[in-house]
Image (cartoon, helix red, strand yellow):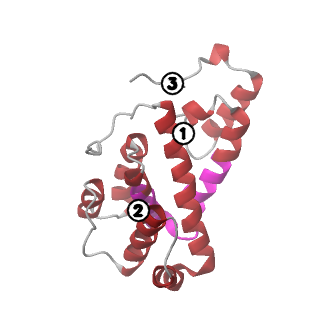
């Protein structure tokens, strides 16, 4: 299957696309990659999306380790190879145990999670699989993170589901990664 919305050569970018691309390059990501390649075809959407993602990825109320865990659960739910290739190594560096990453990759509930990790895992899995969150799961997450943290956790799930849909629809190829690709 071929990529549908591949890179736009700089010489072919509109002024709006150049500005949107430069904003991503100048931000904490430092480069235009992953979902921003297909999103650049709609520069205003890309600009709005990257601002939301910058907050959720780098400044969410639940911190980097737990944000990365939520991203992995979302990537696995959507079978999203690009997000997995990018975020599995980041999650490991942020302190998510490799056995947890490996279990999520093969759709097995990880064991031995810390209470905050368990709250994130349960919340994300339930939200994706049932499209809602039970009172017990909500209460466990709220106990760990408060209202702001739970709100950010929902935002992380929604944001990375959006990116997964964009890249799955655009057939974005996964970059080289130290992480093994998600199995079928």
Q: Is residue 31 rendered magenta in the image?
A: no
Where is residue 14? Give x, y as percent: 73, 21
Q: Secondary structure at mark 2?
A: helix
- Give the residue displayed 43% in from the left and 45% down from the top: 83
Q: Is residue 61 rendered magenta in the image?
A: yes
Q: From the image, give the main secondary structure of the stretch colored magenta.
A: helix
The quarter of the picture where residue 120 lies is bottom left
Residue located beneath label 3 in the image: 4
Where is residue 78? Give x, y as percent: 42, 49
Query: Total label count?
Result: 3
Residue located beneath label 2 in the image: 69
Give the number of the disc on residue 25: none
**Which residues are the magenta region?**
50-73
**Sequence order check, earlier mark of 3 and 1:** 3
Residue in front for this viewpoint, 66 or 163: 163
Residue located beneath label 1 in the image: 166
């Amino acid at each position: 299957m071929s990529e549908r919305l591949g890179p736009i050569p700089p010489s072919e970018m509109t002024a709006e696309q150049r500005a949107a691309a430069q904003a991503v390059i100048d931000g904490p990501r430092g480069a235009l990659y992953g979902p921003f390649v297909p999103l650049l075809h709609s520069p205003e959407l890309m600009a709005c999306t990257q601002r939301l993602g910058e907050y959720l990825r780098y400044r969410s109320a639940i911190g980097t380790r737990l944000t990365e865990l939520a991203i992995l659960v979302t990537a696995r739910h959507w079978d999203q190879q690009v997000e997995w290739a990018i975020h599995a190594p980041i999650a490991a560096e942020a302190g998510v145990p490799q056995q947890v990453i490996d279990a999520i990759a093969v759709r097995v509930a990880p064991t031995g999670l810390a209470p905050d990790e368990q709250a994130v895992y349960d919340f994300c899995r339930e939200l994706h699989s049932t499209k809602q969150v039970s009172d017990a799961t909500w209460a466990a997450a709220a106990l760990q993170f408060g209202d702001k943290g739970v709100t950010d956790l929902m935002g992380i799930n929604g944001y990375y589901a959006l990116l997964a849909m964009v890249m799955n629809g655009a057939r974005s190829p996964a970059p080289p990664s130290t992480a093994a690709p998600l199995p079928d």
